[in-house]
Image (cartoon, helix red, strand yellow):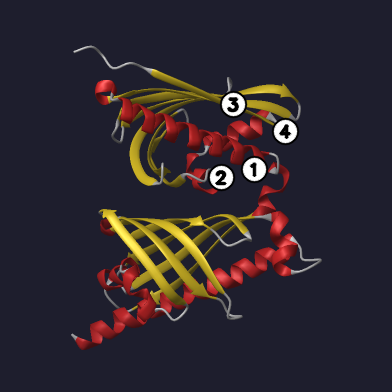
């Protein structure tokens, strides 16, 4: 049987930002879910400064896919090569190169190349992969260009925080409460509607309506990746409120000798152009940071306390 044909794609974008800034954004895969809309979560498996292995979850043609990749970083040349070690069907092999070319002190060109094969070179599979690569690459490069051009203000646009609660209860009960989101409308007062599917074990796709303190209802859509043995659930909102361009988070359950700490962590990238439209004339990024911190923290802390009550009540009933 003849070897599968290698298919090649190329995408590039000119960015009004220094080449070093652009390279830094593509080098740090742990932050890709903040900047790349298709990327849901990245687990860094190994990293020695030059060689990296990652497991990634991302959307492709409306589906959530996961694969493991190896990357080789060349900072001096501003080049990163990658190869999928464990591709997701219908991909048989996938490799590529990121390159950043300096066009001037404040301008650069980012290029992304892919070479891939499909099992049996099936035409439908090839068309599916080509569509996914083209859509995701265009989205990723376009969004990264926008983020890079705001690089001098990224510290103001990015907000990371967490809230924790101590619990005298079983870690398994806490994890179950957080995992069983289909039961949240009856357990969590600010959740009025929640639809969830889990076609792949541990990967939940959900749509949720939440009620804010002022009585308004926000609809969000998210993908959650669950790690029961580690007591972790990570997620990314794929449809966010107007004030955010990205929102990722993590629920973690950590037992110790005296009890359990359950934590909610949020990472948000603010949408600066929406600040005054959402918060009113004259509102600033500082106002937006306070508003988001309070709104997200209020809801997640309420959920943490409900999980605490659930776990501690179950323990008392045993």
The Cα atoms of the two marked residues, 1 and 3, are separated by 16 Å
Crowdedness of circle 2 by 10 Å Cα count: few (<14), some, many (20+)? many
SS class, disc 4: loop
The answer to whether residue 228 is left or right of residue 25 is left
Q: Residue at x 47, y 22 (%)?
A: 9
| Residue 231 visible | no
Q: Position of residue 219 (x, y in %)?
A: 51, 66
Q: Is residue 24 visible?
A: yes
Pick whichever of labels 1 and 3 is earlier in the sequence.
3
Res. 188 image quadrant: bottom left
Residue at 25 percent across and 69 percent down: it is 172
The residue pinned by badge 2 equals: 35
Whichever of callouts 3 and 2 sits on the residue coming sooner in the sequence is 3
Return the x and y of residue 192 as percentages of the image width and height. 44, 77
- For label 3, the residue is 12
From what the image shows, is residue 41 above or below residue 248? above
Callout 1: 10 Å neighbours few (<14), some, many (20+)?
A: many
Mark 4 highlights which residue?
16
Residue drawn 71% across the image and 61% down it:
275
């Amino acid at each position: 049987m003849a070897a599968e044909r290698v298919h090649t794609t190329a995408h590039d974008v000119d960015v009004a930002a220094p080449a070093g800034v652009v390279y830094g954004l593509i080098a740090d895969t742990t932050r890709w879910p903040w900047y790349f809309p298709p990327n849901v979560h990245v687990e860094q498996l190994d990293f020695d400064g030059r060689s990296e292995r990652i497991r990634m979850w991302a959307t492709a043609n409306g589906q959530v896919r996961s694969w493991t990749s190896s990357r080789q970083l060349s900072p001096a040349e501003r080049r990163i090569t990658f190869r999928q070690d464990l591709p997701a069907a219908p991909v048989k092999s996938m490799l590529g190169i990121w390159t950043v070319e300096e066009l001037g002190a404040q301008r650069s060109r980012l290029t992304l190349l892919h070479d891939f094969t499909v099992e049996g070179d099936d035409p439908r599979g090839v068309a599916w992969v080509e569509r996914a690569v083209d859509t995701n690459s265009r989205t990723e490069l376009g969004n990264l260009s926008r983020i890079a051009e705001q690089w001098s203000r990224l510290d103001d646009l990015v907000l990371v925080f967490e809230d924790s609660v101590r619990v005298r209860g079983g870690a398994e009960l806490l994890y179950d409460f957080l995992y069983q989101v289909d039961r949240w409308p009856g357990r969590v007062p600010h959740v009025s509607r929640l639809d969830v599917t889990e076609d792949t074990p541990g990967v939940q796709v959900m749509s949720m309506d939440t009620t804010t303190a002022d009585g308004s209802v926000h609809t969000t859509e998210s993908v959650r990746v669950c790690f029961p043995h580690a007591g972790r659930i990570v997620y990314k909102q794929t449809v966010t409120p107007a004030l955010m361009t990205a929102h990722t988070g993590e629920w973690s359950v950590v037992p110790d000798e005296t009890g359990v700490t359950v934590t909610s962590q949020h990472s948000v990238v603010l949408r600066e152009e929406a600040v005054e439209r959402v918060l009113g004339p004259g509102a600033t990024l500082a106002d937006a940071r306070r508003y988001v911190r309070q709104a997200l923290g209020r809801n997640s802390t309420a959920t943490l306390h409900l999980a605490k009550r659930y776990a501690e009540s179950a323990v008392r009933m045993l």
